[in-house]
Amino acid sequence: MSSPEFSIIEEFFTPKHDQGLPPVVGIGDDCAVVDVPAQKQLAVSTDTLVEGVHFLPDSDPLLLGHKVLAVNLSDLAAMGATPAWFSLAITLPVLDKAWLSAFSQGLFTLAKRHSLQLIGGDTTRGPLSITVNIMGLLPKHQRLTRSGAKVGDGVYVSGTIGGAGLGLEKAKSDAFNAHDEDLLAYLKPNPRIDLGKQLLKLASSCIDISDGLSADLNHVLKLSGVGAKIYHDKLPLTDSVRQHADKIGDDLWPYSTGDDYELCFTVPERLDLSSMLDVTSHNITKIGVIEEGGGLRIKAKSGELIQLNKGFDHFNVE
Ligand code: ADP
Ligand code: MG
């Protein structure tokens, strides 16, 4: 390997140690080849981060390396899959070794934590954009989907909601503290892989919250042919998110902000979740119930029911 493209791959994108299931053929050939173990099936997903759209210009490369993998891992978590392999397509405006070194460190640190192996990719020049194609394994005939919610099921979320959205607001302003918990929620999401795997046998539906709770839960409701009622006072919010919503005079703000990468899932009423799962360590909160009649209704403090059907859409520019 001698051209700049190949030296980038060799120096920054060659796994230095085994990080999980080794591929049959890894980086260096025209395709990677993987063996899917007997009794398993493959879960595959792709997510792209574009500079100026998904992250701010001049973002810290270490955190970007983390985030591009985290958002893809979050999709595997939402299906209950165990991470196995990924490929990386990266478009770079310039060859900046310090940038690449930090990016690759952020990427491989998270990959190692989840025994995830880099098996190929593509390296091109142009406006900064990063795409990961991720592959995970599921037991044959098992998966979490968006389409299984049933009337009477409880609606749950992990973690807290809206922190990443507030973190984005803070990142856009000049005066931010690098240790701020909202900023970290935005820059360094923690994909809920372990929770997803445990939900495989418990949840009737699951989605990860990337575009906002309202938008993502609405996907579940539509595909499951049901509606939901959410009790606003049950929504897990940090003090800073609560204060922000108060300040802007919009209680519903946390439902429409994205990037939380928590899981939203439904569980049949007959299952006692707390006896089957450590709800405290997974930080799980029941926020509502699945009902007949489509759409999402928020039961406000006043008792009023508010219909909420919108979230973030890249092509909706109103
Ligand atoms: P091709 O021209 O056949 O698409 P490339 O010359 O682009 O192959 O890539 C050579 C090898 O390096 C391939 O195995 C490819 O998967 C791998 N590769 C390219 N870019 C990356 C990257 N950013 N990270 C990991 N592997 C990469
Ligand atoms: Mg190529």
Image: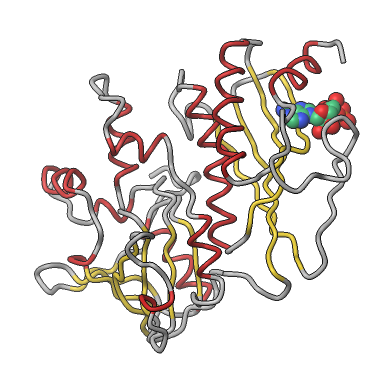
Q: Is residue 122 visible?
A: no
Q: Is residue 238 visible?
A: yes
Outermost residue, front side = 17
Q: Identify the image quadrant of the N terminus.
A: top right
User: In x, y percent, where is residue 84?
Assistant: 70, 50
Reply above or below: 55 against 11: below
Outermost residue, left side = 302
User: In x, y percent, where is residue 96?
Assistant: 61, 10
Q: Which colour scheme is used?
A: secondary structure
- In the image, 287 versus 57, the foreground residue is 287
Outermost residue, bottom side = 270
- In the image, 47 versus 99, the foreground residue is 99
Where residue 182 sits, quadrant-wise, is top left
**Left or right for 14, reference 283:** right
User: Residue drawn 33% across and 59% down?
Assistant: 283
Total marks shown come to 0
User: In x, y percent, where is residue 165?
Assistant: 32, 42
Reply above or below: 158 against 273: above
User: Residue drawn 25% across and 51% down?
Assistant: 253
